[in-house]
Image (cartoon, helix red, strand yellow):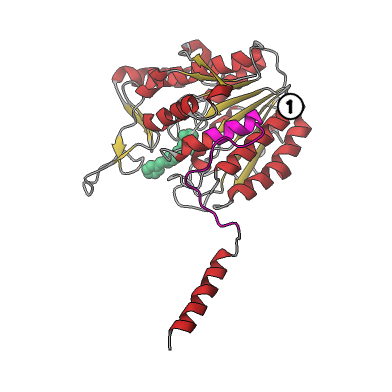
Amino acid sequence: DKLAVFWHEGMLAHDAGRGVFDSGRDPGFLDVLDQHPENADRVRNMVSILRRGPIAPFLSWHSGRPAHASELLSFHSSEYIEELVQANATGAKKFCEGTFLNPGSWGAALLAAGTTLSAVKHILDGHGNLAYALVRPPGHHAQPNRADGYCFLNNAGLAVHLALDSGRSKVAVVDIDVHYGNGTAEGFYRMDNVLTISLHMRHGSWGPSHPQSGSVDEIGEGKGLGYNLNIPLPNGSGDAGYEYAMNELVVPAIDKFQPQLLVFVVGQDSSAFDPNGRQCLTMEGYRKIGQIMRSMADQHSNGQILIVQEGGYHISYSAYCLHATLEGVLDLDAPLLDDPIAYYPEDERYTMKVVDMIKNTWKESVP
Ligand code: 6DK
Ligand code: ZN
């Protein structure tokens, strides 16, 4: 069974501009400004590694499509959609810090939403168990009434609603983007048929963390009490920390909930080299998380997983980590792709050894 990749190159038309990092501002001190971190190039590299990397034979490619405005109302309010349509008609609008709707952005956002809906429909119609929506702009901060953190439409949230409307009675979302999936959590906060789980950087552990919520005491409300699980992790949690959190928290929560569909929200900004995070995952950690997701799906949802793309800003390592994640989900016997960047000494006491060596050399060489 191949993993179905849903993609449409029209999503490359969204351009959030340039500035100092993601601010869009130019105070005038620099000759070379950053492209906005959520740029087309990062996704071009994801497309190319999936087409040309060793995972290519295990994938099938499917065209995405734009969502109809009416399809957005399962998650978003009509007032908010009207605001987006208006902003697009006007030309451009800054919705909040880092979040720019420019000419081309609305078309891309509609494609991201529609492509994610096509991906989940592929599973719901029984065409395959594994589907990946390779989409931008991202979605997991987008709330029913508000754009936020590079996001306009909540792609994963819309897919969850389609699954519920198609007769799946319980759906679980596991979000490993380095930022809290606050939009998705909010959309399902009062519901007991959608379990939202997010692993993210603990607010306050590193400067520009976004959003400033996602603590462990946000557990849902009303009927939804106990159906939002936040896992705020310290910086540097790394492969071992994430594997532990998956096994100790995510697996038991999913086992108890018994979802009929798993939605795996992926962001490679939890990697060791991401400019937007400090969680220090490597390809190995992403591969392991993918494997754990697959084994939960085999147990609960007939192996069915919808994978939805969110952030991931290192221009090459994000693509490699995506490749590793999908290797894990495909549960291949041996890793296909070596990690080109990460160098980790096998002994964690390596620095002490080096210091001891320097001490000895110093003693012997200085009279
Ligand atoms: N920027 C995401 O990766 C998006 O989760 C992350 C958004 C991060 C920060 C946005 C932000 C500022 C703040 C202050 C001043 C300038 C810019 F949605 C995903 F893409 F997946 O607050
Ligand atoms: Zn993120």
Residue pictured at 56% horizontal, 17% vertical = 119
What secondary structure is the magenta-colored segment mainly? Answer: loop
Q: Which quadrant contains ligand 1?
A: top left
At label 1, the amino acid type is: Asp
**Left or right: 75 with respect to 150?**
right
Q: Which of these two is toward me, 189 or 297?
A: 297
- Identify the image quadrant of the N terminus: top right
Q: Is mark 1 on a helix, strand or loop?
A: helix
**Left or right: 107 with respect to 33?**
right
Q: How many labels does the image show?
A: 1
**Left or right: 103 with respect to 152?**
left
Q: Which of these two is toward me, 55 or 5?
A: 55
Q: Give the range drawn in magenta.
A: 323-346
The verdict on residue 331 being magenta is: yes
Pinpoint residue 366: horizontal percent, then vertical percent: 43, 85
Identify the residue position indicated by label 1 in the image.
298
- As drawn, the residue found furthest toward the bottom would be 367
- As drawn, the residue found furthest toward the right would be 256
